[in-house]
């Protein structure tokens, strides 16, 4: 993948209005992601070198916490998605501790923080997660429980490390969820693959949130050149979605369809206008 480059940058804003209906704000301590997942939609939404050189360049927002303290003091508390276009617990977090700092600032100010990661490093912050358990939820992405995860997620933690993190966080009384997504044709859409993730999540005490691969130009090109061309048709997803729902019912797992949740959240918000 070539040499990794990490640059320190300063920002004027920490929290941004979220385009996702389940969040009021988004917080991304970093731009770019060293996990380098080949399918990630974020590479199409990240400007400059961190997007163009996905997995090899990361910008660290070194003044994020001081900016966030000011914003948290004046903004109306709401739900913060951390992170929406990067992984908050990717390798630079071990040094910079921006996700940890942001978690504490936001929780103390009355915000709810929804974390999503592919890293076992999130367990480092178990003390804060447990302390603010009523103001935080943690989602861990697991596309497959098998070693083949390395094909499309080259530098993310192994799925077994991720599910162990889920177990520890759930045991501390924190709401946890496993993101089974994206489901990609020919990679993790086999019923046995899907069942393994659902069973592992259920055993760990987490609910399952699932979603399909959503084609984007840069991600499509990266998959085609590095792995294979992907065609995620509506017919394919209808069949796969039905399989997931059947598995969830058989396992007894609570499973949520992202698209349905988005629709329901939008309707709920519109009803309060």
Image (cartoon, rainbow, N blue to C red):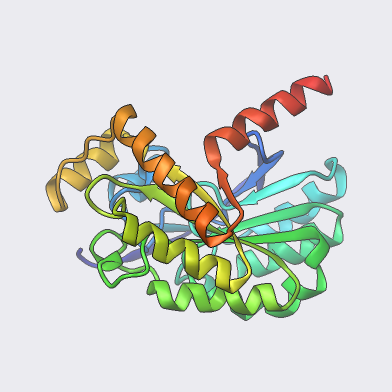
Say which residue appears at 33% left-offset and 64% top-offset. Answer: 5
Residue ranking furthest to the front: 250
Image-based side of 78 in relation to 188, left or right: right
Camera-side residue of 15 and 155: 155
Closer to the camera in the image, 178 or 3: 178
Percent of width and height locating residue 49: 33, 48
Residue 212 showing in the rendered view: no
**Numbered circles on residues, count:** 0
Question: Residue 221: percent from the left, percent from the top?
Answer: 20, 40
Q: Position of residue 33 (x, y in %)?
A: 41, 58
Residue 252 appears left or right of 238? right
x and y, in percent, of residue 166 in the image: 58, 72
68 relative to 41, above or below: below
Quadrant assignment for the C terminus? top right
| Residue at image coords 32%, 34% | 216
Residue positioned 32% across, 61% down in the render: 192
**Relative to residue 268, is residue 147 depicted above or below?**
below
Which residue is pictured at 81% across the width and 50% down the height?
72
Q: Is residue 28 above or below residue 123?
A: above
Is residue 72 among what the camera can see?
yes
Q: In terms of image quadrants, where is residue 25?
A: top right
Q: Quadrant of residue 96?
A: bottom right
Quadrant location of the N terminus? Answer: bottom left
Q: Is residue 44 left or right of residue 210?
A: left
């Amino acid at each position: 993948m070539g040499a990794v480059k990490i640059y320190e940058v300063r920002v004027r804003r920490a929290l941004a209005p979220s385009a996702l209906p389940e969040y009021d704000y988004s917080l991304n301590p970093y731009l770019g992601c060293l996990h380098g997942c080949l399918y990630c939609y974020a590479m199409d939404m990240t400007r400059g070198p961190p997007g163009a050189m996905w997995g090899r360049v990361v910008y660290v927002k070194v003044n994020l916490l001081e900016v966030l303290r000011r914003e948290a003091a004046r903004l109306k508390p709401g739900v913060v998605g951390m992170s929406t276009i990067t992984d908050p617990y990717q390798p630079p977090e071990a040094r910079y501790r921006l996700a940890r700092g942001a978690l504490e600032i936001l929780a103390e100010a009355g915000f709810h923080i929804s974390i999503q990661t592919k890293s076992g490093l999130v367990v480092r912050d178990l003390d804060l997660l447990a302390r603010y358990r009523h103001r935080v939820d943690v989602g861990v992405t697991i596309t497959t429980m098998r070693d083949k995860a390395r094909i499309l997620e080259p530098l993310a933690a192994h799925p077994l490390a991720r599910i162990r993190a889920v177990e520890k966080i759930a045991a501390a009384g924190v709401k946890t969820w496993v993101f089974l997504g994206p489901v990609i044709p020919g990679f993790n859409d086999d019923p046995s693959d899907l069942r393994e993730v659902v069973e592992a999540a259920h055993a760990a005490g987490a609910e399952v949130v699932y979603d399909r691969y959503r084609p984007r130009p840069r991600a499509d090109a990266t998959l085609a050149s590095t792995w294979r061309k992907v065609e995620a048709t509506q017919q394919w997803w209808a069949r796969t979605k039905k399989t997931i729902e059947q598995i969830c019912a058989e396992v007894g797992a609570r499973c949520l369809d992202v698209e349905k949740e988005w629709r329901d959240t939008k309707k709920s918000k519109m009803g309060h206008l």
